[in-house]
Amino acid sequence: MKQGFIIACTACVLLSLWLSQYIPADIFDKIVSPLLFAGTVAVAFFGAFLVFKHAEGMRMRKAWGWALLVWGIADSFYLLGWALAPSQVMDIGAHNLTTYELLIGNVLGWVLLLYPTEALRPGWISFRHVLWHLLPMFLLVALDYVFPFSLRFLITLYPIVLIAFLISHVRAYRTWCEENFSTLDDIDVQWLVRYLWMVVMVGGLYLYICLAHHPSRGFTQLWFTIFMFAYSTEQILYRKDPWAMVRRQEKSQEAAPEAGSSPEHSELRQKLDRWMEQEKPYANPAFQLADLRAVLPLNRTYLSQFVKAEYGCSFYQWVNQYRIAEAKRLKLAHPGLKTDEIAARCGFSSRTVFSNVFTREEGLSPREWFKQCNPA
């Protein structure tokens, strides 16, 4: 998936840059630009419709739906302005960015950060926090009109501050996922990293076309924006919400006693070890931290602390230790078993995930490990 994403992004940018060389400036302004903006509007509105229709109460999906809606409305105003007076509303290709252009670009760029903000910190988006995000940018814009010197460089760099703020929470999000899930498919931080990378590319291309000599460079930015909207909408519609999964799991189980009323750690660990070895719950790819409450009468927070204190690792790493040990046992007992079957029996969602986890933990691929154990 990661390689396919990189190839698709690179191909999109390089192909559009190559094509833009053959588009005359007047043709771009009169025909190509309106068509691309119309395509952006269509993809944005249709994507927003799909996301809101299948939101299923997930705030992160709604955040992406609102981002698409706002961007679609903004580009609709461009088309309206072009229809009433065939000229560019924003001077794409200008040598010097105006404060107005920077303001519009920064606001639209900030809108694209609504989704990752909600994904990394659910419930954080509120009217007060929105003001906290945007107020410094509006103050810089206002001061730019007052001061005798230009503040446009600072306005240009402001989105970098917002992205850095989000990136600072990526590690905490991954740690939380590892503490609650035994499989990180569809909830891992890699998708958010890819999304933020696309946002950075959209912003970089926007600055590039504003500084480029040829207006048709806007072809690249508009084409990549359409690609980003379509790709992100498809990914977000099929991506799970780990926060909602944990909340549903907690609601489906009765409240457990607090740590103070629990047995001794040694007794709990022995009980848990026996359950893991006999029942093998790790064979289920959907195995979660909250499932431990079937054998340990503890709340989720204390369960996470218990696993980390007793086993010296996260829940995700602890479960994978059992899965890898089971994979080794199966391969030695049944040499004819295929890797796909071993992965499925041990609770891995795919052969690729199994190979990656095994190689990371053992320092050898499953094939190399088996050859080492069976040199004949």
Image (cartoon, rainbow, N blue to C red):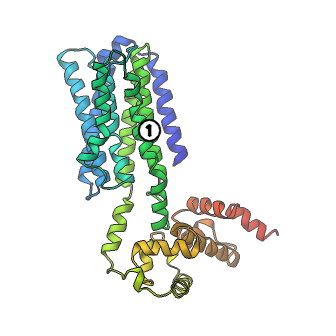
| Of residues 278 and 122, the one drawn nearer to the viewer in this rendering | 122
Which residue of the protein is positioned furthest toward the left in this rendering? 84
State which quadrant residue 26 falls in. Answer: top left
> Dot 1, crowdedness within 10 Å: few (<14), some or many (≥20)?
many
Which residue of the protein is positioned furthest toward the front in this rendering? 147
Can you say whether 254 is above or below 184 in the image? Answer: below
Image x and y of residue 154, in percent? 40, 27
Question: What quarter of the picture does the C terminus occupy?
Answer: bottom right
Answer whether residue 80 is visible to the viewer in this image.
yes
Can you say whether 33 is above or below 137 in the image? Answer: above
Label 1 sits on residue: 198
Image x and y of residue 142, in percent? 27, 25
Image x and y of residue 373, in percent? 77, 70
Answer whether residue 43 is visible to the viewer in this image.
no
**For the residue marked with disc 1, what is the amino acid?**
Met
| Of residues 354 and 376, the one drawn nearer to the viewer in this rendering | 354
- Residue at figure coordinates x 56%, y 60% from the top left: 353
State which quadrant residue 31 falls in. Answer: top left
Which residue of the protein is positioned furthest toward the right in this rendering? 376
Image x and y of residue 181, in percent? 46, 67
Q: Is residue 113 left or right of residue 311?
A: left
Can you say whether 72 is above or below 331 in the image? Answer: above
Q: Is residue 188 left or right of residue 84?
A: right
- Residue at figure coordinates x 42%, y 46% from the top left: 166
